[in-house]
Amino acid sequence: MPSCLRGKKTGTKPRSELLFKQALTTNGLKFHTLIRLKTSDSSGKIGVPRSGGLCEKGGHFMNFRTKSEKYFYIMLVFCVLFSAKVIFAEKFSAKEWNTLKMNGITLDVKFSPKGNYFAYRVYNAYYVCDQNYNVIWQYENNEAPLVITSRLFDFSPDEKYIAFGRYQTSHDIGIFRLSDRKIIQILKGHSDHLNSVLFGPDETCLISGSSDKTVKIWNLSGGKFFERQTLRGHSKPVYSLSFSPDGVYLASGGLDKNIKIWKSFRGRFSEFQTLKGHPYIENVCFSPDGKYLASGGFDEDIIKIWKLSRGGFFEFQTLKGHSETVENMAFSPDGKYLALGSRNRFVKIWKLSQGIFIEFQILKGHSDKIGNICFSPDGKYLASGGWDHTVRIWKLNGVSSGMNIPMNKVKDAVASLFRHPIWGNIREFKQDFISLLRDPMWEGIGGMAGILSFIVILMRWGKRK
C-alpha cells in the first residue's frame, strides 16, 4: 500500500474509489499497473479487489483487466508474429539474371562483404568490378598456373583491402588497397605455391594455405601485414581454409585426407581436432552461425556436414546425389541454404529444414563444370563461375541477409503492435514487422510462442466454462 494512502480515509461514501498508477519501464515500453482502490465502508479500510494493466506508447492505450490477461495478450503477440511470418515470408526462388562473358575459365568469384564490389579470377588474371559489374581494376600474372585451384583471393571485412595469391610468383600474396587502387605490400614467406587466401572475421587477420604443407597467420598493424604464426600439422599441400564467424576456429583441408581444426586462444592458434572421412580435401566451409562445417574432397560426389558440440566437431550428415565431383560450396548469409557447384554443370541447393539438410533445388545454365560459387551479403544474388567462360548471376528470393535480430528492431516491433491494435492499422503493422519477420530465427521462436498461446487459450476457455 502506498505510504501516501496508508491510514487515510477516502471519503464518507461507502463505495468511493481511488486510482493509483505505478509506472514500470521495460525495454523502452511503459507498462502501468492500474489498481482500483475501494472502501467497503466508512471506516477507511481500503480493499484491492482487482488490478489491471495499461500499456502506453505515444498517447495510445490498451487496457487489461487482469495481469493474466496482459500476459495472455503478450503471448498472443508472438502468435501473431508467427502467423505473419507464414503469410508474408517469400518462398525461395532463383532465376538467371545476368551472364558475364569471360576470355577463359573462371576459377574464383566473390562479392565484397558490404556488396560494393564484385571480383573474379580467370586463371591468374584478377578483375575487380563495381556494383554494375564494370571492371575498375585488373592484374594479370603471365606465369602459367601450376595447379588449377580456387579461393585465391579475398576481400577484407571493411572492404579496404583485397589479398590475392600468386601475385608476382606462385609463392607470394599481393595486398591491394581499394581506396587508391594500388598494391601496397607483397607478402613472402611460403616456399611453395599458394592454394588459398582468406581474411578472418576482422581485417586484422589474414590466413594463407600453401603446397609447402603450412598455414600462415598474417596480422595487420600500422597499415602493414606481418607474419605472426605458422601452423604445421598437414603432411601434404593445404588447399582450403575457412574461419568460424566468431574467429575461434579455423578449418584447413588438404591432400593428406585430414581436416585440421585449429582453435584460437589469446591471439594464437593451436591444433584442436582432426577430422577424417574424405580421400582428399578440396573444400571446407563454415555456416554463418558456426554450428556446421561442410567439407568436400577431390573426385568425390559427396559432401559431409560436421556439427559443433561441446567436445568438438562430429560427423552429422552426408549429402549424396551428385553425379560428379563437387568443386565448391557456399552457405547463404542466413544459413538456411547450402549451394554446391559441381562438374555436372549444375548448382544444387540444399535447405536446412528441421535440423537436417535436404536436397531442395537445381540451377541449370552452365555448359561446363562450375569452378566457384558465392552468395551476395544481402542474400539477393548467387554468382557461379564456370569452365564455359562465363560468370552467371542468379537472382534470389526468400534469402535474408543474416542470422542476427537487432534488439532495437524487436523493441520497435513490439512497441508498434501495442500502439496499433491487431484490428487497427494493418498496413503500418506490416511495415514495422516486415524486416523482422523474414529472419529465419522467428520460425522457431514464433512456433514455440504460437504453441504456448494456444495452450493459454485452452486454459482460459476451460476456466470460463
Image (spheres, grey):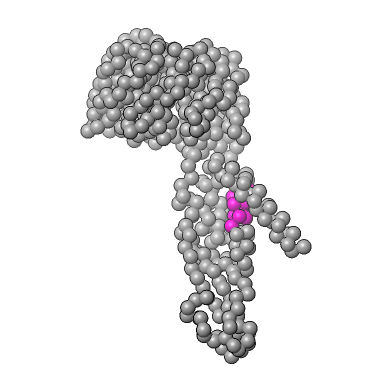
Image quadrant in which you'd find residue 152:
top left
Give the side of residue 3 with respect to residue 266, left or right.
right
Image quadrant in which you'd find residue 141:
top left
Q: Image height check: is 152 above or below 131?
A: above
- Foreground pick, 409 / 427: 409
**Count of numbered tags:** 0
Is residue 78 covered in magenta? yes
- Foreground pick, 11 / 405: 11
Query: What span is colored magenta in the figure?
Result: 74-83
In which quadrant will I find the C terminus?
bottom right
- On the image, the x and y values in percent for residue 139 come to 31, 19
- On the image, the x and y values in percent for residue 84 come to 61, 48
Give the side of residue 118 with respect to residue 5, left or right.
left
- Residue 335 seen: yes
Is residue 6 covered in magenta? no
The residue lying furthest to the right in this view is 465
The residue lying furthest to the bottom in this view is 12
- Foreground pick, 115 / 71: 71
Give the side of residue 223 with respect to residue 343, left or right.
left
Q: Image height check: is 258 above or below 46?
A: above
The residue lying at 33 percent from left, 28 percent from top is: 268
- Foreground pick, 185 / 458: 458
| Magenta-drawn stretch, dominant element (helix, strand or loop) | helix
The residue lying at 62 percent from left, 62 percent from top is: 68
The residue lying at 51 percent from left, 36 percent from top is: 334
The residue lying at 48 percent from left, 28 percent from top is: 312
- Residue 381 seen: no
- On the image, the x and y values in percent for residue 111 come to 41, 29
- On the image, the x and y values in percent for residue 41 come to 63, 86
